[in-house]
Amino acid sequence: MKPIIKVKTGMKIPWDVRYSLSLLILLSSTLFLCNGQDYGTPTEDGAGEPPPEMARCNGIFMSYSFGSREREYPHVKNVTAQSWAFKSTAMIVNAGKEELTGWQMFIGFRHKELIVSATGAVPMDGDFPLDASNGTTFVGSPNTDLKTSILTAGDFTQISTNIEITGTLFGVAKSVMPMPKTLKLVNDGWECPAAKRKGGTMNVCCKRNPKFKVKTGPKTKFAPRRHGDLNIVYDVIQSFSSNYLAQVTIDNDNPLGRLDRWNLTWEWMRGEFINTMRGAYTHKRDPSECLYSKAGQYYKDLDFSQVMNCQKKPAISDLPPERKDDKVMGKLPFCCKNGTLLPPLMDPSKSRSMFQLQVWKLPPDLNRTALYPPQHWKIDGVLNPQYKCGPPVRVDPSQFPDSSGLPAVTYAISSWQIVCNITKPKAQASRCCVSFSAYYNNSAIPCNTCACGCNDIDTNTCNADRNPLLLPPDALLVPFDNRTLKAKAWAKQNHMPIPKKLPCPDNCGVSINWHVNTDYRNGWTARLTVFNWRDFAFEDWFVAVEMGKSGKGYENVYSFNGTRVPPNNRTVMFQGLPGLNYLVGQVNGTHPLRDPPVPGKQQSVISFTKKNINGLKIAEGDGFPTKLFFNGEECALPKHFPKKSSGHRGGISVLMSLVFAMATAFAL
């Protein structure tokens, strides 16, 4: 008699039948799981079915899916000014038979997107928050390469990457789906058709161009090194379970870029702190910040009074030259130049800085291979270009000469590159400015109103939006506060209106006057005068002048060193001669109670030829620079240049020019 099992329904099932049903259910569930693994999407849980377009792609498949958005504060009626917080997902999958190393995915955002965070990737164009209104390129982090399904048995964690994007967008009505304009792979040798869009998703399948010739060169395991205005490399050269030794190398690769007294900051993301440094120092050393942090709780026996810095965002500067041979902090190549990074065109030996730091880690990173670079790098100088730095990108380990002196090469354990590029100063945000004058016009056009900002002055007493008043040329020799009487008298003499609310000053620490001196049939000359209104000096200063078509005719400079800047040779760099490369700061007048302060000054005449240059019209703008740089910083140019009228009085203009030159020479 077979055993009987009673169930709630009252139905009786024999044991052998129950065993057969259980086995059938088990086999069915196994088949279901296998089927899900074969056709799952490249997500962490592997659930769901892939897009049908991916199944038909035999290359690199990419997709973008808009998730959600919420209205942000402040709430405004103007649709174009309203901001929305959004979430979206991008995906890249290697559906082909060729491994993709160092993948680069471009998303053509077009709604003034500001990317706040992204998981699984980092942007190449800057750090978070990132202005992606013109699109941005993502690279893998930490998964920089996409292997093939053949070599990984379909392991989606190795052949794909998901990017979870969070950010803000502007100017889109609630009924409009804010999708990117383009989606493409920008790696060399790959071609992508126009992305297909359906609702809130878009996708594209990119394929290798069979005609593309691979550039011969060393193969890289990680992302290839990029070229920028300022290149920073973070190398780990020693690694222990609880700490590692890192070396930071800063290279100035821009022919007009420069930093003076550079100040570098970053952000530790995993509780690290700096125990010791060589070649640089931090601006704050507070043991209490260590004792009351997670580091103090974990390293209970460590003497934190000897620790260099425990700040999450340390401020780091170069050592002064007198510390170069210090046995504890110095003795490192390319260090101890007081934070000076000159263009390689001026002095290649002074275009690099280097320092080392011993970094201590916290759990769970207590093993030799748990190495993470700091994020959010920023670097700045004194009256220098403003740099915008991207995130650290893992690159192939750096190579160093072997310390033993043998013809061998030593490699870093891990290396990351941070690329910083010069940003064009915004309106009223420069640090230097230019004034224009000419022999054929009585008046000089001074620097623009608030050229270097008006944040520190009371704009109720002056007009920040009005053009500056024209001046007699000799008024450029005195500070702005002492020009008011001269400006009013000059306006009355030349029958020009005087506004009740005078324009605000330019507020620039350095101003440069460009004066067209002569103009004749075969050539012309200009005079360049540099004024330092600061209370400190500039050593190894330089001025770079970018001319239009007249730049080809540069002949000579008589009190400076002049060097053409390749590749177009229309930009000329001027430096002080030996003994005159020191631009002193502002000093008091001969009689301080009645004389205005006197700025530091350098001046020279520059000659140009008109040979082989057709249609050159000096008085109509060809005699004035299109860009002018002081120590790498792009200076604000006047909105207009002196015009030559039919009724001008040349004799008086030449006289004023001579007065200005004599006054400057006397001051020098």
Image: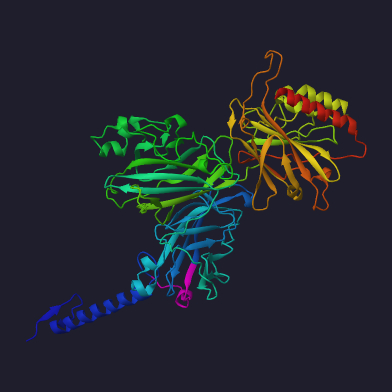
Report x, y in % for residue 135: 57, 57
Q: Is residue 451 visible?
A: no
Q: Quadrant of residue 4?
A: bottom left
- Count the labels in the image: 0
Q: Is 433 a magenta residue?
A: no
Seen in the image, is 298 located left or right of residue 277? left
For this orientation, the residue located farthest to the right is: 647
Q: Quadrant of residue 515?
A: top right
Which residue is painted at 46% across and 76% down in the image? 58
Report x, y in % for residue 61: 47, 70
Of 85 and 593, which appears nearest the observer?
593
Report x, y in % for residue 409: 37, 54
Q: Is residue 294 visible?
A: yes
Q: Quadrant of the N terminus?
A: bottom left
Of 445 and 261, which appears nearest the observer?
261
Q: Is 55 a magenta residue?
A: yes
* Location of residue 656 with respect to 550 vertically, above or below: above
Seen in the image, is 373 located left or right of residue 106? left
For this orientation, the residue located farthest to the bottom is: 1
Q: Quadrant of residue 175?
A: bottom right
For this orientation, the residue located farthest to the left is: 1
Which residue is painted at 47% across and 71% down in the image? 60
Of 428 and 372, which appears nearest the observer?
372
Report x, y in % for residue 199: 54, 68
- Please report the bounds of the magenta region as a residue range: 48-62
Q: Quadrant of the C terminus?
A: top right
* Location of residue 542 with respect to 406 vertically, above or below: above
Of 200 and 55, which appears nearest the observer?
55
Seen in the image, is 108 located left or right of residue 518? left
Colour pattern of the rendering:
rainbow
